[in-house]
Protein backbone atom coordinates (compact mmCIF):
# COMPACT_ATOMS: atom_id res chain seq x y z
CA UNK A 1 0.00 0.00 0.00
CA UNK A 2 2.94 2.34 0.58
CA UNK A 3 3.74 2.33 -3.14
CA UNK A 4 0.14 3.23 -3.99
CA UNK A 5 0.33 6.26 -1.71
CA UNK A 6 3.67 7.22 -3.26
CA UNK A 7 2.25 6.88 -6.78
CA UNK A 8 -0.69 9.10 -5.78
CA UNK A 9 1.75 11.64 -4.31
CA UNK A 10 3.69 11.69 -7.58
CA UNK A 11 0.53 12.09 -9.66
CA UNK A 12 -0.70 14.94 -7.45
CA UNK A 13 2.66 16.70 -7.55
CA UNK A 14 2.96 16.44 -11.33
CA UNK A 15 -0.61 17.71 -11.75
CA UNK A 16 0.10 20.63 -9.43
CA UNK A 17 3.33 21.49 -11.24
CA UNK A 18 1.56 21.53 -14.60
CA UNK A 19 -1.18 23.68 -13.06
CA UNK A 20 1.52 26.08 -11.86
CA UNK A 21 2.36 26.83 -15.48
CA UNK A 22 -1.30 27.10 -16.44
CA UNK A 23 -2.09 29.44 -13.53
CA UNK A 24 0.03 32.17 -15.16
CA UNK A 25 1.29 33.54 -11.86
CA UNK A 26 -1.91 32.76 -9.97
CA UNK A 27 -3.91 34.99 -12.31
CA UNK A 28 -6.21 32.13 -13.41
CA UNK A 29 -8.49 30.77 -10.70
CA UNK A 30 -9.07 27.13 -11.68
CA UNK A 31 -5.42 26.22 -12.32
CA UNK A 32 -4.48 28.04 -9.11
CA UNK A 33 -6.96 25.92 -7.13
CA UNK A 34 -5.67 22.74 -8.81
CA UNK A 35 -2.14 23.80 -7.91
CA UNK A 36 -2.86 24.29 -4.20
CA UNK A 37 -5.00 21.16 -3.87
CA UNK A 38 -2.44 19.15 -5.84
CA UNK A 39 0.51 20.11 -3.66
CA UNK A 40 -1.49 19.57 -0.46
CA UNK A 41 -2.57 16.16 -1.77
CA UNK A 42 0.98 15.28 -2.74
CA UNK A 43 2.31 15.98 0.73
CA UNK A 44 -0.61 14.17 2.35
CA UNK A 45 -0.03 11.05 0.23
CA UNK A 46 3.73 11.19 0.82
CA UNK A 47 3.05 11.43 4.54
CA UNK A 48 0.80 8.35 4.39
CA UNK A 49 3.50 6.37 2.57
CA UNK A 50 6.03 7.32 5.25
CA UNK A 51 3.59 6.60 8.07
CA UNK A 52 3.13 3.08 6.72
CA UNK A 53 6.83 2.31 6.81
CA UNK A 54 8.41 3.47 3.58
CA UNK A 55 11.92 4.77 4.20
CA UNK A 56 12.22 8.51 3.69
CA UNK A 57 15.29 8.26 1.44
CA UNK A 58 13.49 5.96 -0.94
CA UNK A 59 10.17 7.81 -0.76
CA UNK A 60 11.62 11.25 -1.35
CA UNK A 61 14.09 10.03 -3.97
CA UNK A 62 11.42 8.29 -6.01
CA UNK A 63 8.91 11.11 -5.52
CA UNK A 64 11.29 13.86 -6.60
CA UNK A 65 12.92 11.94 -9.44
CA UNK A 66 9.68 10.65 -10.91
CA UNK A 67 8.16 14.12 -10.70
CA UNK A 68 11.06 15.73 -12.54
CA UNK A 69 11.14 13.04 -15.22
CA UNK A 70 7.37 13.04 -15.77
CA UNK A 71 7.09 16.82 -15.96
CA UNK A 72 9.94 16.93 -18.51
CA UNK A 73 8.33 14.19 -20.62
CA UNK A 74 4.84 15.73 -20.44
CA UNK A 75 6.30 19.14 -21.28
CA UNK A 76 7.93 17.70 -24.38
CA UNK A 77 4.93 15.62 -25.45
CA UNK A 78 2.10 18.09 -24.82
CA UNK A 79 3.51 21.57 -24.23
CA UNK A 80 5.96 21.83 -27.11
CA UNK A 81 8.92 22.16 -24.76
CA UNK A 82 12.22 20.93 -26.19
CA UNK A 83 13.81 17.77 -24.86
CA UNK A 84 17.45 17.42 -25.84
CA UNK A 85 19.54 14.27 -25.95
CA UNK A 86 21.34 15.42 -22.81
CA UNK A 87 18.00 15.81 -21.02
CA UNK A 88 16.90 12.33 -22.11
CA UNK A 89 20.21 11.04 -20.73
CA UNK A 90 19.50 12.88 -17.49
CA UNK A 91 16.10 11.21 -17.23
CA UNK A 92 17.78 7.84 -17.75
CA UNK A 93 20.23 8.68 -14.96
CA UNK A 94 17.33 9.66 -12.69
CA UNK A 95 15.69 6.29 -13.32
CA UNK A 96 19.00 4.55 -12.63
CA UNK A 97 19.43 6.49 -9.40
CA UNK A 98 15.96 5.58 -8.19
CA UNK A 99 16.62 1.92 -8.98
CA UNK A 100 19.91 2.10 -7.11
CA UNK A 101 18.14 3.58 -4.08
CA UNK A 102 15.53 0.86 -4.09
CA UNK A 103 17.86 -2.06 -4.81
CA UNK A 104 20.46 -0.78 -2.39
CA UNK A 105 17.94 -0.88 0.42
CA UNK A 106 16.69 -4.42 -0.33
CA UNK A 107 17.35 -6.98 2.36
Image (spheres, rainbow, N blue to C red):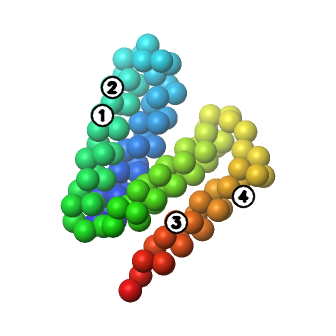
Residue for badge 1: 37
- Answer above or below: position of 38 versus 32: below
Residue for badge 4: 89
The Cα–Cα distance between marks 2 and 3, rounded to whole angstroms, is 31 Å
Residue for badge 2: 33
Q: Residue at x 33, y 45 (%)?
A: 42
Please report whichever mark, 1 or 3, sits nearer to the chain's N-terminal start: 1
Q: Is residue 44 left or right of residue 23?
A: left
The image shows residue 91 at horizontal and vertical percentages of: 64, 56
**Which label number is shown at residue 71?**
none
Q: Disc 3 on helix, strand or loop?
A: helix
- Answer above or below: position of 103 versus 83: below
**Badge nearest the viewer, 2 or 4:** 4
The Cα–Cα distance between marks 2 and 1, rounded to whole angstroms, is 6 Å
- Residue lying at the far bottom in this picture: please name it: 107
The image shows residue 96 at horizontal and vertical percentages of: 60, 68
Q: Are marks 1 and 3 in contact (CB under 8 Å)?
A: no
Tell me if mark 1 has few (under 14), some (14-19) or many (20+) residues whose alpha carbon lies within 10 angstroms of its own. some
Q: Are marks 2 and 1 in contact (CB under 8 Å)?
A: yes
The image shows residue 18 at horizontal and vertical percentages of: 49, 35
Q: Are marks 1 and 4 in contact (CB under 8 Å)?
A: no
The Cα–Cα distance between marks 1 and 4, rounded to whole angstroms, is 32 Å
Q: Where the N terminus falls, by quadrant?
A: bottom left
Q: Are marks 2 and 3 in contact (CB under 8 Å)?
A: no
Residue for badge 3: 98
Q: Residue at x 30, y 45 (%)?
A: 43
Q: Is residue 73 left or right of residue 1?
A: right
The Cα–Cα distance between marks 3 and 4, rounded to whole angstroms, is 14 Å
Amino acid sequence: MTWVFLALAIAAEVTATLALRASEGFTKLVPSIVLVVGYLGAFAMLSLALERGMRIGVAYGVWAAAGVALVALIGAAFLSEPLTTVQVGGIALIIGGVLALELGGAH
